[in-house]
Each structure stands twice: as structure tokens, then as C-alpha cells.
Amino acid sequence: MLWKTIVTSVRSSPFFISVIVFGVFVDLLFRYLSSLSYKYLIDNALLPRDIQALAIIVGILVAIGVLNVITGISSDYAKARLGIKLLFDYRIALFRHMQAQSHRFYDRFQVGDLLARYSDDIPQIQSVVLQTFGTGLLSVSSVAIGLCILFTMEWKLTLIALVGSILLFVPYRMLKSRSLALADTYYAQLGQLNGSIDENLKAYRVIRVFDLRQSMLSKVEGILQTMASIGIKRNFVDSNLNRLPLLGISILTAIILAYGSYLTFEGKLSVGEFIAYNSVFAIVGSSMYGIAAVLPYFLAAKTSLQRLQQVMEWEPEVKERGVKELPTVHSHIELRDITFAYVPGEPVLQHFDLSIPLSGYTSIVGTSGSGKSTILQLMLRFADPESGAVMYDGQDIREARYASLLRQVGVVFQDSILFHGSIRDNIVVGNPNATDEEIEEAARAAGIHETIAAFQDGYHTIVRNYGDNLSGGQRQRIALARALLRSPNILFLDEATSALDPDTEQSVNETILRLSRSRSIISVTHRLAYAALSDRIIVLDNGKVAELGPHEQLLEQNGLYRRMWEKQQGFVLSRGGGSAHVQEDRLQKLPFFQGIEQEALARISQLFVAEKFDAGETVVKQGDQGDKFYLIVRGKVKIIITSESGDRHKVAVLEDGDYFGEIALMKHIPRIASVVTTTPCLLLSLSYDHFHPLMTNFPSIRETLEAALKTRMQRRED
């Protein structure tokens, strides 16, 4: 496979390769004529004292030497151009391939791992290609030509040299597997290092505020120490791949000198022939060593090529095969008999049908894992269904040009990434040809124009570090303006406001509600307080449409939507969302607090303490002693169980209104799972130490709690 890559490089750059090959030919001509000239210098010029012969020999050598310098300079320039071309071609090919990928690709290959392929693997492949057409081609050609010359001069001596050359390649056979294994381990650690550095750069504020600098330093230091240890072993093995062949060359040279001297003593070789033979053999020996020296590059490149192929052979899930333009969409989006799975054999949607009219404001809600985000991905064609079709006004979007679909939609994600550049640059992403008036109009529609105008540099204010110099609400409104600048027929919202504080979220949602009067909006959300403002709500459950209708109608059905609605009620947030408290009526809906008198519930509600967490933080750790019960006021967390072998498995996702850790109210037993935030979270915690004294004053609390937890434990054992 490595040779195939090299051959491909040759075909892509025939001119550069021709210049390099010609330079190699002239170099070989100069080397061997210089060596063979000793025979003629000694036997035909020096010993006979023939000045004319001496002048001719020296003149020819000078002429070829000048030509060698000229072609050498040209060859070096060609190698430089070829090297840069290879870097460009491989890197742009990898980048194009990455752009065609979907979420599974980025789940499989982490950021650090991909960066390592750009910064190390591709240069390693470039290096071996250049070595092949530089040292490799020169050495192989030199050995072939040199052996032919030596056979014509003294075949017995040459046969000894040829057999003895096996010594040069014994180290390669001995150390090849070790070198490859060390390279694999080294690049795996390099990927971890790049990932850790990327994580530190993006999460520097969280690391600083929670004083994680030492732990992160220890993590990176541990990786670097491992890399250093592996690097020492790897460099030692590779140096032996270069050094041990020298021993073979030394032994072989000694044999040639000894036997050649014997032949000279016997009169079978002249002094000039002996000197010329040894001079040619020195070139051949050096070239043999050159071949052996290139082999470590091949080993390193083999590992790099395998790593690059792992990425390049990953087939995109969505292939853009459509050639027709998608007509302007104005009627409806239909998901017809859709079956889709992230993991083969585990469908998220199975024979799923849904039709969404393109008018007004539609919200898609459901518990975590119900399929709402999957539906959005399918409608945007971030993924294609295994069977069935996504239809826009009756046309399968797989048969339409992808760009013609994207021109008609705008999207605002929960974590809207802003690019480094000015605010204007970030908005104009939505329509690169937009005028200043159109940009300002989109910003006004998103409710951000006045804020931008108040900045010192206005629309030319630089966005830094993905938008860290802006507030969350400002980032979302800029992202909304970016989407609106496309003048989309359909505006998709993917949990677009769930990471904002309550006041900002309400303000942004008011803007969205106003926009729904002039365009179709489809929102995926778990926050029902804002879904309630929609014209229609689609309620999903386990990959099926459970309920459909406006808010009031769904409440009257007294089904899943009502249960979800009630779960999120009963929390009172402070202005700005920095704190909250839970009402007694909400506590009474918890199964282990049902039946407790109102006075006791009022006392319990006063004991809750608000705790805020950023995304990615561990709230509780598996194995730690349980001492708190938690209610999720806002945000989303994942429950992770770590097996004895160290494997981590996500077993559940909890969001607004859910709870965890209730056993800690009665017993200090180790946590059976870890809880990690996936979005910024506001939680209410009730500690065992604060709660326990209440059970003395209110015996009903203990009785109710013990009965509920006993039932819970029995269900878990069953």
C-alpha cells in the first residue's frame, strides 16, 4: 500500500519526478566516472607521465562536475516543490473528506487524533516519498550500476560483496516489529496530548475557576512523560536500524580490502584497478547503507499511512448524489416510513411517519432519547434514513442538490459557534453577498442591532475565542441573525435557548415568537414553558408520535405531555436565574414525599440549596458516599456507570424536573453511578445533614420515605 501511495505521487507530478530522476542520473555518472578515473589516471596518465591524457580526464571530470551541480540544484528545487505539493494535496484531501462526514465520524476520531494526522502523519508520508525519490532512488540505482561495474572488474570479489551485503538488512528484520509497535503507541499518546491541549484551550475558564490547573497539568505531564519514555525507546530502536548496518559495511569493507590486496599481490589486479575497484565499492557500500538508512522512514511512514487510511476509508454517511434543484418549499415536510439507527440493530426510529405543515411555529418535544434530535438531523440531512424518505413538498431530499436545500433553511443550535473575525463576518456567513443594509435588517430582526451599534467598533468588533467576549444571549442573537440573513423559508431551532439564563431566554424566545409570524419555525426543545407558545406541539415517545396538538388541547388529554409539563412546574427562579426554590406542591408530586403533611413539605422546601454547574462537570462520582439529593431545575445531565474494567457506559439522561440521589436522604451508601452535566445546570440540592433532623419532628417523613425507598430497592433487585 505504501508503494501504491508513492506511485500515485509519481503520476501526479511527472515533471518534478523527471527533474529529480535526471539529477540522480547525472549524480551517479559523476560518482562512478570519478571512481573509475583512478584507473586511467594512474595507469594511463600518471605512471606514463602523459599530460594530454591527464588534461582530458580532468576536463571531463570538471565538465560533469559542473553539470552535476546544476542538475543537483534543479533536483533540490523539484524535491522542495514536490514536498510542498504532497503536503498540500494530502492535507486538502483529508480536509475535504472531513467536511463530508457526519457525527459518527467525529465520535470515532477525536480532535487531537485528527490534528496528529495533519501535523505528524502526513509530513511523515511526505518524508518517505522524498526519501524514495532522493536517497532511495539514488542508492538503489547506484547499487545496481555499481555491482555491474564491479562484476566486470572482478566477479569473484564482487560475489563476496554481494553475499556479505545481507548483513546490512539483518537489523531491519530484527527490529521492524518493535519499531512499528512503538510508533503505534507513540501516535496514540500524541492524539491524547493534542486532545488535552485542545480541551485546556477551550475550557480555560472552567479550569481556572475550579482550580483544576494542577490536575490538568498532572494529566498533560503524565502524557508527556509516557511519550518521552516511548520516544527514547523508539529513537534507540531507529538509531540501531541506522547504526547496525555500519557494522556490516565495516566487516564487508575489511573483507574486500583483504581479498583485493591478495589479488593485487598475485598480479591479477593492477594497482590502478585495485584503487578504482575499492573506490567504486566504497560508493556501492555507501549506497547499500543508504538503502538501509531509508528503511526506518518506511516503517514510520507505514504507521502514518495506516492511520491516515483509517480516516480516509471512513465512508461518509450522507452522499450528495442529487442533481436537481429543490423547488421553493412552502407546503409541508414529511417523514415517510422512516427507519434509522445510530448503532446497527438498535433503531431509534422504526417505520416512523410524520407530516409537519410549514406554517407558524411548531415545537417537537419528548423525553431524552425519544428521537426529537434525530428527526431534526434527518430533516437537515445531517444523516440519511436506512429506509423511508424525508420529503419536502413531496420531493425526496436525497434526489435534490444539497446546496439547494440549505439555501432554504436556517438553523440555530444550542451551542452556536462563532468564528474568529468581526461580528459582521459572522453574520455574513449566512449570505456572503449580503449588503450592509441586509445585514443590519437581519440583526434588527434578531434583536441585536442596538447592542452591536453600542460597541466601540460596532459591526467590526472582533469575536474572540468562539465568542467568549460576548454574553450567551448576544452569541445566540448573532447566530439567529446569521440564520435570518439567508431569508430562510424554514427556521430550525435545536435547543436554541436552553443554555441561556431565564431572562435572556425569555427575551430571545419573544424574538423567535415574533419571527414565527413571517416564516415557518420548527423548534426541538425540552423546555415546555416555551413550547407552550407554539401553534402546534409534536410529542415523541420512544421513536413514535405520542400526541399532537396545541398546548391547551394536550393538557386536556391528560397524557404524556401533561406529565412532562407538571414535572417542569413548581420551580421559582430568581431574576437572572442564579438561584431558585421549589414549591411544596411540586415536592408532593415526588413519589417518596407523597402523603407528607403540608407543614413538613414547607420546611423541606426551605432546606434546598441552589448549585450551578457548567457543562462537563461531575456532580456526583461513582463510589463516593451519598450525602445529597438533587432536583434539576434547568439543564441536562448524563448518568454514567464505570465497570470494573474501567469502561464507562451512559445509562440515562436527565433534564428539567428530573431528580437523582434520593437514597442519600436516608442512607450514606456509595453512589452507584456518576452524574456529569452535558449543559450548564441549575440544581437544587438537599443534604442528609439538613434533612435528617426533620424526621425527628415529623415522623411521617421517615415512614413515607422508608416505604418509598424500600419499594424502589425491591424493584432494582428484581
Image (cartoon, rainbow, N blue to C red):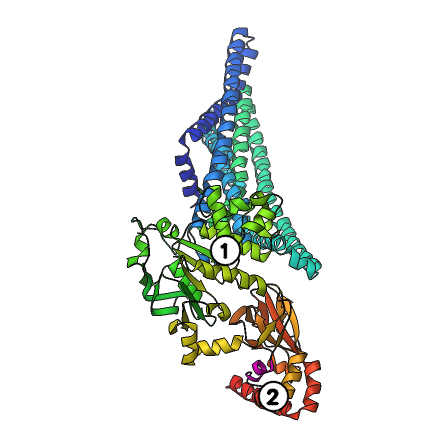
Q: Secondary structure at mark 1?
A: loop
Q: Which residues are magenta?
A: 583-593
> Where 427 sits versus 14, above or below?
below
Give the tally of numbered discs.
2
| N-terminal label among 2 and 1 | 1
Query: Which residue is pictured at 30% across the width and 48% down the height?
Result: 323
Query: Which residue is pictured at 55% across the width and 7% down the height?
Result: 51
Mark 1: amino acid: Phe
Residue 124: x and y in percent read: 52, 43
Q: Residue 586 lies in magenta, yes or no?
A: yes
Q: Nearer the viewer, residue 424 or 687?
A: 424
> Which mark lies nearer to you, 2 or 1?
2
> Where 207 sits versus 648, above or below?
above
Residue 615: x and y in percent read: 59, 63
- Crowd rating for badge 2 (residues with CA inside 10 Å; few <14, some 14–19, many 20+): many
**Mark number for residue 462?**
none
- Crowd rating for badge 1 (residues with CA inside 10 Å; few <14, some 14–19, many 20+): some
Q: Residue 281 lies in magenta, yes or no?
A: no
**Mark number for residue 705?**
2
Mark 1 = which residue? 109
Which quadrant of the structure image shows residue 609?
bottom right
